Image (cartoon, helix red, strand yellow):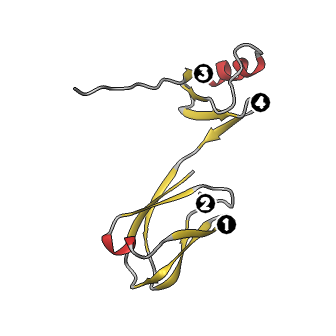
Amino acid sequence: MKQYVRFQQRRGTKAQIDAWQADSIAKLQAGELVFASDTKKVYVSDGTNLYPVSVFTGSGTLTAGTTTTITDVNATSSSVIVIQPTSTAIVALGVYVSAKNNGNFVLTHLAAAGGESFDYVIV
């Protein structure tokens, strides 16, 4: 029998969320997520401050050689970048993120023929 689990985070308008942060009892705890129903944004708390959670996606192909630079304006030096292979040819190439910069990131891999495809997520 299937069982479903529902996770529900606090939600309210951005003004309500800001008010909770100012209230010692209602204050969001570290790691707690909250959804702003008016702005449609998700925030995470560190126990003191709120930080917007932004997720960006894209796709690409490896270039021939051992490094591939992906240009994406959403990439920053502090981004978390997750690579998801979308072709079997890429799996054996040991792809990893070797550098993160503002506006791009670099993938290092074994010698690629070029054209091996992947999707990525930037958080």
Real-space CA distance between mark 1 and mark 4, rounded to the nearest whole angstrom? 28 Å
Please state which amino acid type lies under the numbered disc 2. Answer: Ala
Compare marks 3 and 1 and give the one earlier in the sequence.
3
Discs 2/3, front: 2
* Image height of 68 relative to 85, above or below: below
Q: Are circles 1 and 4 on residues that touch, CB within 8 Å? A: no
Real-space CA distance between mark 2 and mark 3, rounded to the nearest whole angstrom? 28 Å
Real-space CA distance between mark 1 and mark 2, rounded to the nearest whole angstrom? 7 Å
On residue 13, the disc is 3
Packing grade of label 1 (10 A; few <14, some 14-19, many >=20) is some
- Residue 52, percent across and down? 64, 39
Q: Are circles 4 and 2 on residues that touch, CB within 8 Å? A: no
Q: Are circles 2 and 3 on residues that touch, CB within 8 Å? A: no
Please state which amino acid type lies under the numbered disc 4. Answer: Thr
Discs 1/4, front: 4
On residue 48, the disc is 4
Packing grade of label 2 (10 A; few <14, some 14-19, many >=20) is many
Real-space CA distance between mark 3 and mark 4, rounded to the nearest whole angstrom? 18 Å
Looking at the rendering, which quadrant does residue 74 occupy?
bottom right
Real-space CA distance between mark 4 and mark 2, rounded to the nearest whole angstrom? 26 Å
Q: Which part of the image, by quadrant, shows the N terminus?
A: top left
Looking at the rendering, which quadrant does residue 88 occupy?
bottom left
On residue 75, the disc is 2
Compare marks 3 and 4 and give the one earlier in the sequence.
3
Q: Would you name the residue on which mark 1 appears?
A: 101
- Residue 40, percent across and down? 53, 32
- Residue 17, percent across and down? 66, 22
- Locate residue 38 relative to residue 77 in the image: left or right: left
* Image height of 56 relative to 10, above or below: below
- Locate residue 15 relative to residue 10 in the image: left or right: right
Q: Are circles 1 and 2 on residues that touch, CB within 8 Å? A: yes
